[in-house]
Image (cartoon, rainbow, N blue to C red):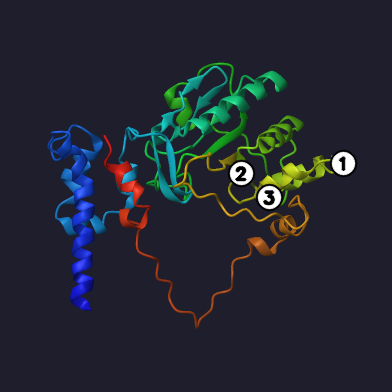
Amino acid sequence: MYRSMLSAKNSLTALLVLAVFSIPVLAGTDPAKEDSPLGSFIAKKVGPAEDIFHITARRLFGTQKTPANLKPEAIGTYARGCMAGAQALPITGPTWQAMRLSRDRNWALPQTISLIEKLANYAKINFGWNGLLVGDMAQPRGGPMLSGHASHQIGLDADIWFTPMPDRVLTAAERETFVPLEMVESHYAINRDNWSVERAKLLKTAASYPEVARIFVHPPIKAALCSWAANDADKSWLAKIRPMPNHTFHFHVRLNCPAGMKNCKNQWKPKPEDGTGCGKELAYWMGGKAWQKPKPNPNAKPYVPPPPLTLSGLPAECRAVVTAP
């Protein structure tokens, strides 16, 4: 049995190495000398064949500077996948500006970019805002990030700031240091000086788009929306807006898998008991229990973190994405 397992591993190793090097070789180039981030990365980091099992997926994808020249596709799940054929959101548009440019996370599928443009135009037309500020989307080829988000891996997630776009184009330096408005004062209280009806309407509009699967906000923001919409005849849009810590100055929009993308897996979407999420689910977050640290258990075994995610832990289609020209 041991020999058969070893043989299987060696065969998988050979397949992975072939996948990594096949495209540059077929293109008539030397991958070790190829003038690209991937070629440079392979030459410096991969080394012997066995080493591919130890390279973290976040380093493989986090070093990419160009999108995969493939048909646009979301592959895998929001927190374990990659993206082919990404497009870059222009850093400055007529009704938006991208922020934190040094992260190189203004990439997404065309459907996500279209939604941002649509929502930014809505804010300008209906609120008189100059537009929206857009935070993290995804890396050029998606995948795990070098830092920060666990999701944002398949080009269907975007962080949109609650701070309206200024009336001028921000410099690159300003986009790194610009301080956004905070919408909450604590885990339990909205910041009434910054929160507004316009922001509530912006969230309701985004949640009403059929392509939107979920929107994540800090719990007091969800509570404010529940109060604001208390007399609405149709509150079904509230079910898409879910309380999630650390979304205090922006909201996270997540799209459904676009039609025809068979390798994309939608997130499991249980409906809140009351159809809005304004009941027990919200009460949990607005109560003290959600924020209490568990008491240490002296008899508990020491926590052993899982091994880092590698390329072999992502969908097989991601090998073609990471090696594509």
Left or right? Give the position of 9 relative to 122: left
Residue picked out by circle 1: 231
Report which quarter residue 250 is drawn in: top right
Residue picked out by circle 3: 219
> Looking at the image, is mark 2 or mark 3 earlier in the sequence?
2
Observer-nearest of 35 and 288: 35
Dot in front, 1 or 2 = 2
> What residue lies at 40% left-to-right and 48% top-to-bottom?
144
Question: SS of the residue at dot 3?
Answer: helix
Disc 3 marks a residue whose amino acid type is Pro
Percent of width and height locating residue 131: 60, 22
Question: Is residue 248 shown to the viewer in this render?
Answer: no
Dot in front, 2 or 3 = 2
Task: State the separation of the CA atoms marked 2 and 3.
Answer: 18 Å
Percent of width and height locating residue 258: 53, 39
Location of residue 58 with respect to 260 vertically, above or below: below
Percent of width and height locating residue 226: 78, 45
> What residue lies at 13% left-to-right and 40% top-to-bottom?
32
